[in-house]
Image: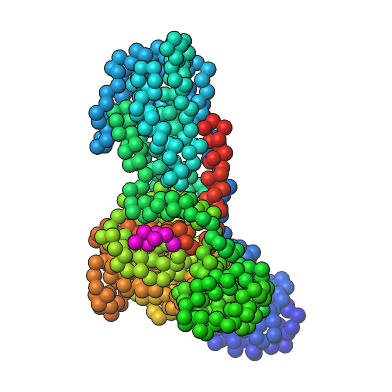
Amino acid sequence: MKVFWKTSVLVPATALAATLALGVPQAGAQTFLDMLFGGPVRHEKPLKGEFPPPPKRAPKVAPARISAPSYNTYKPDRLVRVDFAALATPQTTGATTADATPQAAAFQPQPDGAAFRQALAGLDGYELFAESGIAKALVSYYSANPDFIWVTGTEPNARAAEALRVLNDAASYGLSPADYTVDLPPAAQTAGDAAARANELIRFEMALSARVLRYIHDAQDGRIDPNRISSGYYDFPDKPLDMVATLQALSHTTQVQTYLESRHPQNPEYQALRTELEGLRASEENEIVVDPKLLLKPGETSAELPKLLTLIARDLDDDMGGAYGETLSRLVGSETYAPELVPVIEAAQKKAGLKPDGVIGPRTVEALAGSSKADRLAKVQYALEELRWMPSDLGSPRVFINQPAFTASYIEGGEEKLKMRAVIGKVTNQTAFFYDTIKTVNYHPYWGVPQSIIVNEMLPKLRSDPGYLDRAGYEVTDSRGKRIPSSAINWGAYGAKVPYNVRQQPGEANALGELKILFPNKFAIYMHDTPQKSFFKRDVRAFSHGCVRLEDPRGMAAAVLGKSVDYIADKLKGGHSEEKVTRNVPVYVAYFTAWPTMSGKVEYFPDIYGRDAKLQQAIDATAEVRAPTS
């Protein structure tokens, strides 16, 4: 028997010749031999002139994952000492044009600035610390404009008194008055030391200007730079603030309070949150406070249960009282979640608009017991800070998605024209916090699978089943756009970088459903339909990979396009297509655990991603940096 190459098993020449004569592709030769011998052939070095061994496959790469963004330990910029040395030689050019606001009028400081120049010596040895931009603005402004803004004669003037009142009232905006503290110089003595008085006044002038600029920055932009909180969950543009022009405006206005207050967001939501903050501070603590993190299933025990049952019993209506009054009366003090109490909880959940699943969790506690006063105060202050990151005028029309509420709304002309349930990202695939502008509606869309999903979820399966994507209705293309069968790719050769694009074809199984609404952003987040409709029935709807799934996608598409739902239905009949949104419709993919309804009533939501704690850490770090020199 002739042998073609040395192996641990002898192969009949007739069998192998027949196989080769049939023209079996080389890619399938190893499979044939595996089937023939029950396992891979173990090759030795071939004899000279014999058939060469099959080519080696690329080595397998160890499994890898693309990690999600992470949160950072917030580190604010350190304060710097203001360098007043440049003020010793006042400049005569470079003054900045005053801010052209309605309130920037009616006051002209002394033209010669003689008293100011004489007082400059009082800055020798004076240590004033401020943010870097503020420190530069002080030197730049007073070099070009050597005169007092806040002092007239030997006393702080009326504008200074008005500015100090606003700074001291910072708490009404959810800010900390300690960040803007300025010590008033003592009243001038009739026969006092003129040089010492000049020193007090020039230092007061600089301190007040520095803290007013800080206040204006915080009112307009917020105390916190949200983009520093995380490596990839926030994206907010800078709001330009010309601090030199701001001081110029303040030097010309007698309406300081109006000017400073105009720097805060000028929208009804901000005002509603301020009103809520004032009401909370004047209110009493809840009579009964239930642990907001309570999670209790039937059969389990908790000392928090009697509190919740007491609240349900206290608020019984006739229907619930007739059905469950006796049960509550008998078991109101029970710490064990007995089977008899399950229908009571389910009825209370249904009454509160929740899914009646009988499980007592944070949303049930929030709906039935509310949250503590301290928790609500904190959430309102976080919301005020977060609103300062956004435009002062939110725009109309607009789309507003509030992730903790799991809702998406279309708002126009001060009315909520459309509101629907939404599904947001899982805790491991969080939806980002940003705003953008809606650009297009895509009908019967392809789904371009993100690299993170290819690597983290598809690749492990493809290593053992390379043809999976072909069978599941996906297209695979290389970097040049050439389509390649999934089964022809050695997926085991790739780790965290896969050099192929994968997209799912339109159809009933498509992850995006029948349409998507695009607003290009660096997170590749958009709104879309979904075939998984059952998720909208749940109270907690965090199931996506980061995009926002809509309960009524046709309604939202019609709203942003300014069309009817029938129009959208007709477009869908035409198959895959795309339509541009021709008007300006901003979209806010927002994260507020306290947010007002259109009527001004503030509602509270659980912090599903734990972002309030990250914001509090940032606030604390900022306060610590400011504290020693504020």
Q: Is residue 494 left or right of residue 258?
A: right
The tally of labels here is 0
User: What are the residue bounds of the magenta stretch?
Assistant: 596-603
Residue most toward the right?
A: 8
Which residue is located at x 26 percent, y 66 percent? 561
Q: Is residue 599 magenta?
A: yes
Q: Is residue 202 magenta?
A: no
- Residue 404 position, x and y percent, is 47, 63
- Residue 120 position, x and y percent, is 43, 15
- Please indicate, yes or no, whether residue 176 appears anywhere in the rendered image: yes
Name the dominant secondary structure of the magenta segment: loop
Which residue is located at x 33 percent, y 34 percent? 256
- Please indicate, yes or no, whether residue 121 appears anywhere in the rendered image: no
Q: Nearer the viewer, residue 386 or 74?
A: 386
Q: Is residue 265 left or right of residue 371?
A: left
- Residue 68 position, x and y percent, is 55, 59
Which quarter of the rendering shows the N terminus?
bottom right
- Whether residue 187 is situated above or below residue 209 in the rendered picture: above
Which residue is located at x 29 percent, y 30 percent? 254
- Whether residue 301 is situated above or below residue 189 in the rendered picture: below
On the image, which quarter does residue 579 sit in? bottom left
Colour logic: rainbow
- Whether residue 71 is situated above or below residue 122 in the rendered picture: below
- Residue 132 position, x and y percent, is 47, 32
Which residue is located at x 60 percent, y 89 percent? 18
Q: Nearer the viewer, residue 426 or 156?
A: 156
- Whether residue 78 is situated above or below residue 432 in the rendered picture: above
